[in-house]
Image (tube, grey):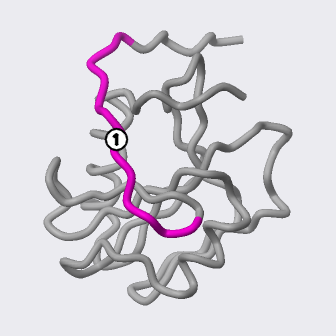
Amino acid sequence: MEMVRGIAKETLEFILGASKNTAPNEFAGLLHEEDGVITDVLILPGTESSDRNAVIKLFMMPNVESVGSVHSHPGPSARPSEEDLRMFSKTGNLHIIVAEPYDKDSWVCYTREGQPVDLPVLDIELEEPEVI
């Protein structure tokens, strides 16, 4: 896995839309990168979501590497809770929290230790997935 240099604009737009659509319940997923760019959100089977938290069933993780996690908060704070920090330590190095109003200015990326980190939004063309 190489160094992550940003997140695809289209992927961030998906995250913001999914967060808004599931509110007041939390949205949660794992982040996948290709060529140093976060391009996909993996929604694991069995993920439970409520207005208090989201629980990702890590034992359902397919044989795919994750660079981190993403989840939403039902209020205006994007600060990680103690539970968030415990999850960060298990699911990679970069973690996005999205808060109300779920727009381009209401998300923060954190390190696994909970320190804010700059994650550039890249306007790149994503490949269409192959249909088999």
Q: For the stretch drawn in magenta, what is the main secondary structure?
A: loop
Please check the rendered image and state whether residue 79 is part of the magenta-colored stretch, yes or no. Answer: no
Q: Residue at x 72, y 11 (%)?
A: 132
In the figure, residue 99 lies in which quadrant? bottom left
Vertical order, 128 against 96 (above or below): above
Vertical order, 119 against 87 (above or below): above
Kind of residue sitting beneath label 1 = Phe
Task: Give the residue pinned by disc 1.
Answer: 14
16 or 129, nearer to the observer: 16
Question: Is residue 100 shown left or right of residue 127?
Answer: left
Q: Secondary structure at mark 1?
A: helix
Vertical order, 97 against 36 (above or below): below
In the figure, residue 1 lies in which quadrant? top right
Residue 82 percent location from the top left of the image: 54, 87
Residue 36 percent location from the top left of the image: 55, 23
Vertical order, 63 against 129 (above or below): below
Residue 79 percent location from the top left of the image: 34, 76
Q: Which residues are magenta?
A: 113-125
